[in-house]
Image (spheres, grey):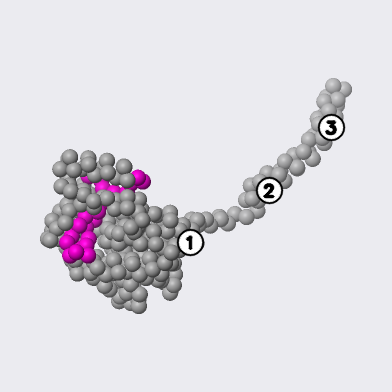
Amino acid sequence: MGIMQISKHNALHMAFLWPLFLLLLVQLLLTSGCSTLSPTPVKTTLAPQSSDNFRLGYTIQAGAFTDVEHAARLSSLLEKQGLNAYYFRHGSGLYKVRFGNYSSLQEANRQAETYLRAGLITDYYLVRPDSYALAKKNELGEDYLREQLLDTAADFVGIPYKWGSASQEDGFDCSGLAMAVYQLNGLDLPRTSKSQFHTGRPVAKDELKIGDLVFFATRGGKRITHVGIYAGNNTFIHAPRKGKQIETSSLSSSYFASRFMGARTYLGDS
């Protein structure tokens, strides 16, 4: 008798709980995106980034050298201090060095004075963000910024390339050229070609515009080890390897065509 009463009680209890169980199961499936019914993983993509996401702040400019070797030596010394330094040929014909990215004039000046006292630099000039081509993009348009990037890259052609003394991993050397060209125009790109590839927005090869970046796996496999700046007409400007002069090459050449891994843009708003 006692057993029969317990069984009836359990049966009534289960009859009461079963609808609630079904309701909870349906809610679980809905809130989980019905993953049990759709085993195919969802492909995610990075949100598009505009050029404003990479806006460069105040930078420090040092030196005025007639010999490129002296500029290269200073940039190498600063890189060993953990700074993303690069040298370039100024409109005056002299070689100068820039480094740093500071949010305020006061911070840039404070850091410059620190490097001055430490003997790393002997003089300096603070570059304001409104002096970059990026600051004029809204007024003059994106094409203006792209033209400035190309003109800047063209100014490097023929200059011996000697940056990236700290490491050659992940295309560290050649990526210094891309970083320098973009920073001179107000865009703070990552330092290595691998990072530049992963943070930029993908662009199809047949939709390339001047100023976009093209990437290669020059050591076999699929690891990004080289980057260049697209110059139009299926050509790009790049630093072949340390000690060689910066030059223009063709994407159609058998060497680069077989090693092409994709292109990225840091321009545009979407």
In the rendering, at what x and y percent does residue 43 appear?
Answer: 53, 57
Give whichever of discs 1 and 3 has the lower sequence position.
Answer: 3
111 vs 43, left or right, is left
Mark 2 Cα-neighbour bin, 10 Å: few <14, some 14–19, many ≥20: few
Residue 103 is one of the magenta-drawn residues: yes
Kindly identify which residue carries mark 3.
12
Residue 61 is one of the magenta-drawn residues: no
Kindly identify which residue carries mark 2.
30
Give whichever of discs 2 and 3 has the lower sequence position.
Answer: 3
Which is in the foreground here, disc 1 or disc 3? 1
- Label 3: which secondary element: helix
Say which amino acid is labelled 1: Asp
User: Split into 4 quadrants, where in the image is the N terminus?
Assistant: top right
Give whichever of discs 1 and 2 has the lower sequence position.
Answer: 2
Q: Which mark is residue 167?
A: none
Say which amino acid is labelled 3: Leu
Kindly identify which residue carries mark 1.
269
User: Which picture quadrant has residue 255?
Assistant: bottom left
- Label 2: which secondary element: helix
In the rendering, at what x and y percent does residue 105 appear?
Answer: 32, 45
Q: Which residues are magenta?
A: 81-104
Q: Is residue 34 above or below residue 226?
A: above
Closest to the observer: 67 or 47?
A: 67
Mark 1 Cα-neighbour bin, 10 Å: few <14, some 14–19, many ≥20: few
Q: Is residue 148 above or below residue 123?
A: below
